[in-house]
Image: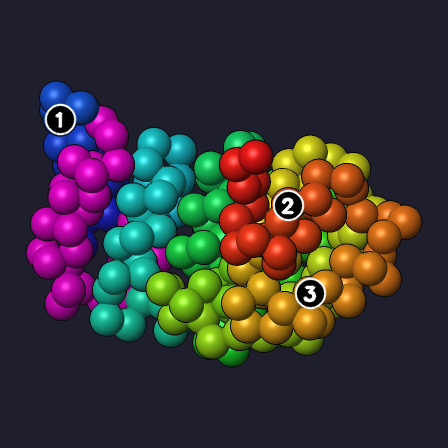
Amino acid sequence: MDVAGLANEIDQQIRALPEQTTEPVRRVRCEFSKRLQGEPAEDLLALGQALLERHRWVGYELIANHPTAMQLLDAAEVERLGRGMDSWWSVDAFARIISGPAWREGLLQDDVIRRWAESDDRWWRRAALVSTVALNDRSRGGTGDTMRTLDICARLAPDRDDMVIKAMSWALRELVPWDPDATRRFVADHEDILAARAKREVRNKLDTGLKNPKR
């Protein structure tokens, strides 16, 4: 497979769309996913790398929707796919499509996510928290994982970076349907160090089912 040529072809088709919004772009991705079903998994990983700068989430979805590409992921490959993250959306695409599912399926060990939680880079710290979403998001195959979710949340509870605080709220709120008692205890036990926004939104979710209920 000509990885560079295929990446350029995907780029050209996306650029030719009247609107480069999620659904039209995803339709292009779906067509390429069908076309690439029989290609070697290694080539899909290379294609994902080739698309990082132009269409990061498209590359991630091509990997995730290939029959065997996700099975080749290990810590080094996952971290290569995360290089260059510099926004909340790039982190969230990476963590929800690549790192979170890889962790859930046992392709990443807990210590990898813990290392990200200790990073000096705000985006890797956010990635650690958003990776827990895949453990708990029922619509994407999550089956609930209180221990690993709260382990990462505890490591980042004192963090005051806004991007991390928002991810903390998200991670805890995703756990609520599976284990509301443990989530409530966690917030109470970390009352003095959790950011006010995270406490408020998680307690709202626990009490009303909504992050920000209407008054």
Element under disc 2 = helix
| Pointers 2 and 1 in contact (C-beta within 8 Å) | no
Q: For the residues marked 3 and 1, what is the alpha-carbon distance in whole angstroms?
A: 44 Å
The residue where tag 2 is placed is 201
Question: Of residues 198 and 147, which is closer to you in this image?
Answer: 198
Residue at x-position 70% and y-position 44%: 200
- Would you name the residue on which mark 1 appears? 17
Tell me which corner region of the image, top left, top right, bottom left or bottom right, holds residue 164: top right
The kind of residue tagged 2 is: Glu
SS at circle 1: loop
Q: Position of residue 146 (x, y in %)?
A: 64, 73
- Which residue sits at x=13%, y=67%? 38
Q: What residue does disc 3 label?
A: 183
* Residue 188 shown left or right of residue 137 in the figure: right
**Which secondary structure type mostly characterizes the magenta part of the structure?**
helix
In the displayed structure image, the side of residue 213 where residue 112 appears, left or right: right
- The image quarter containing residue 109 is bottom right
| Residue 203 is at least partly visible in this image | yes
Outermost residue, right direction?
A: 192
Which region of the structure is painted magenta?
A: 20-47
